[in-house]
Image (cartoon, rainbow, N blue to C red):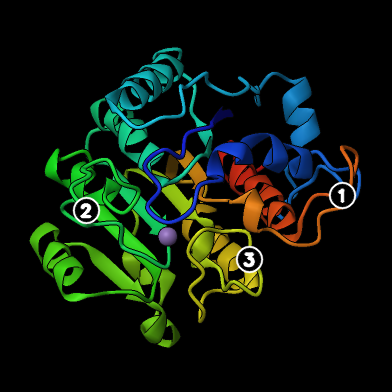
Amino acid sequence: MIGLPWDAHSTHLRGPAQAPPLIRRAFHSDAGNSTTERKVDLAAAADQGRLIDAGDLEIDNRKGPHGVEAIEGAIQKILDQGQRAFVLGGDHTVSYPILRAYGSHFPGLTIVHFDAHCDLYPDFEGDLLSHACPFARIMEEGLATRLIQIGIRTLNRIQQQQVDRFGVELVEMSDLKSFDPTALNLQGPVYLSFDLDALDPAFAPGISHREPGGLSSRQAIDYLHELLGRPELDFVGADLVEYNPTQDVGAGAGPDGEPGVTATVAGKLMKEIVGLMLGTP
Ligand SMILES: [Mn+2]
């Protein structure tokens, strides 16, 4: 696991660059134990050297391609060592350089993307690296064969055009009742990108763009298990992005205070996702 403290291309609020250490703290919190719902003991995995924390990448937190180069290089290094990355953002811009590394390593990649937003703008106010654009860059460069987006509830005309252009498979919140995860027939290498704003802001208020009408924590965990918890599936990497501590609630005061509500949700999702990547015990 590696943290990417970069949010210079956020469009509305800054803050996700502060996320990685806070999510890690929630992940390691003594308030819970280290076993996932699918019975993977993450502390044991760490003791066995199967789960390694590479810390946070040093990135100059300003706009520019330096961040793309740094992140792509760091992820490439992890993949070259035969390892797989679980990445803590950062805002959603980080998914583009991550997928540049993954796309060259894993031909035929499928991306499962949880989000309130498609993040498919051709550019946002002239910025090609905006956190509103990473999946446009990813699909333009052919870094994935399939892009499946779940939780969408902000589809406008320009993004609908991009959905049609790239053949994106959409599961909008308004269609969730008829969503059958098994019908997606996931195959080959699969990468997960999880934006915390896929969740309803009642569950995860600590984000930059609150969009009501989202998934519950329980729905998200169930979909993750159903989609990615199959032993025959090659689940090769994941990111968890857009936690914004400046918008979170319920954090205890002081350096030893309890993590905020959204940090706790992020820590829980991190546990389940890492557990699915490690497979069944
Ligand atoms: Mn989003």
Q: What amino acid is found at the position of numbered circle 2 in the picture? A: Glu
Q: The N terminus appears in which quarter of the rendering?
A: top right
> Looking at the image, is mark 1 or mark 2 nearer the viewer?
2
Residue name at image x 64 percent, y 52 percent: 246
Q: Which mark is residue 205?
A: 3
Q: Residues within 10 Å of mark 1 (few under 14, many from 20)?
A: some
Mark 2 = which residue?
A: 125
Q: Residues within 10 Å of mark 3 (few under 14, many from 20)?
A: many
Q: How far, Cα to Cα, is label 3 from label 1? A: 16 Å
Mark 1 = which residue?
A: 258
Whether residue 272 is visible: yes
Q: What amino acid is found at the position of numbered circle 1 in the picture? A: Glu
Quarter containing ligand 1? bottom left
Looking at the image, is mark 3 or mark 2 earlier in the sequence? 2
Query: Would you place residue 214 above or below residue 259 in this image?
Result: below
Looking at the image, is mark 3 or mark 1 earlier in the sequence? 3
- x and y percentages locating residue 145 in the rendered image: 20, 47
In the displayed structure image, the side of residue 9 where residue 36 appears, left or right: right
Query: Answer yes or no: do the residues labelled 3 and 1 have beta carbons within 8 Å?
Result: no
Q: Which mark is residue 40?
A: none
